[in-house]
Amino acid sequence: MQGTHEAHTGYTGRHLSVWIGVAAALAVAAAIFFGVCLAAAQLEQQQLKAELAQLQTALDEAEAQAAALQEQLAAETEVNTDLQTQLETALREAQEARDALQQRLEKEAEARRTTASAYSDLYPDLYAEPADLQSRAPENTVYLTFDDGPSARTAELLDILKENDIKATFFVTGKTNQEAQDLMRRIVEEGHTIAVHTYTHKYKTIYASVQAYLDDFYQIYTLVHEVTGVYPQIFRFPGGSNTGFNKSIRSELIAEMTRRGFVYYDWNALNGDAEGKPYTEDEMVDYACKGLGISHVIMLMHDAADKVKTVACLPRIIEAYRDAGYAFAPLTPEIKSYRFVKG
Ligand SMILES: [Zn+2]
């Protein structure tokens, strides 16, 4: 029995140690298990943390991007708003400007209609037969023209022309004394063309308005007719058709004069006798000869008391053109006009 007991005791002691061992083993296993679990959990957590950190980083980046985008969008919106405001302002201003311009145009058109009907009704006898403006003159023709007369030089010019059997054109002004009237008659009697250069030759007066020009024109037109019996159809604008003085009424004035059948001529050659610089006779001849080579030369010269050199160099100019094979002719309404401004 003792042995059993001993045995039992021994069994119990062994058992205990086994259990202790098992328990220890279990504990170790448990510890290992928990350790592993913990480790796994920790690993998982680390991974999660890492993922979270990654996510956080990604989120941060996304947020940063979003913020940047928002900022950019805000900036762009601001810019867009600015641009839109500017565009709207520009558009409104453009519309206002257009409306104002339209109103002004309508007003001016109305004023023009009123004025046009006013001046176009003036002087119902101030009309000429419309010319077809086809040049009938042969090639190489020179048209000598003298502006501003009659004057103390007119008779001398007429004498030179007569000696050379040349017909020219005189654009006359409003001189009413007996001598001037006699010269106008002589111009016509000797076969030259008498043409209009205005009555007063005062730029500011004649170019003040179309009506002002017509008022002046009618005066000289009437005077020429009364003195010579000729209704002049040709005219030359003082200063030429494109002078700065007629700028504001130029196109209207040309249209009105053309509508009435009158023909104006500018020039494509000149002797320089009305320029600021006083030329010598030689220089004037050279100047006038610059027209050589032009098929139809319209030569501007002046008929005024102080144009002594114009008279003196005229024979040499005539000679130069004659030697070059040119013919001389007076201007007539059908002769193709040389104009600075096309009517
Ligand atoms: Zn003149």
Image (cartoon, grey):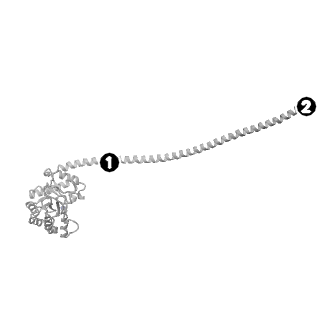
- The relative height of residue 2 versus residue 299 in the rendered view (above or below) is above
Please determine whether, in this image, residue 224 is positioned above or below residue 94.
below
- Front one among 102 and 314: 314
Residue occupying the point 20% across, 49% down:
118
Q: Position of residue 338 (x, y in %)?
A: 18, 57
Q: Which residue is mark 1?
A: 100
User: How far apart are the alpha carbons under marks 1 and 2?
Assistant: 134 Å
Residue 3 circle label: 2
x and y, in percent, of residue 45 in the image: 66, 41
Question: Seen in the image, is 62 located left or right of residue 208?
Answer: right
Q: Amino acid at mark 2?
A: Gly
Name the amino acid, label 1. Ala
Residue 337, picture quadrant: bottom left
Quarter of the image where the N terminus is located: top right
- Which is more toward the observer, 133 or 124? 133
**Compared with residue 214, is residue 4 higher up or lower down, i.e. above or below?**
above
At 19% from the left and 55% from the top, the residue drawn is 213
Tell me which corner region of the image, top left, top right, bottom left or bottom right, holds residue 35. Answer: top right
Q: Can I make out residue 271 in this image?
A: no
Q: Is residue 94 left or right of residue 221?
A: right
How far across and down, in percent of the image, does residue 197 sit? 16, 59
The image quadrant that residue 332 belongs to is: bottom left
Q: Whole-percent x and y of residue 307?
A: 16, 67
**Mark 1: which secondary structure?**
helix
The residue nearer to you, when weighing 1 against 157, is 1
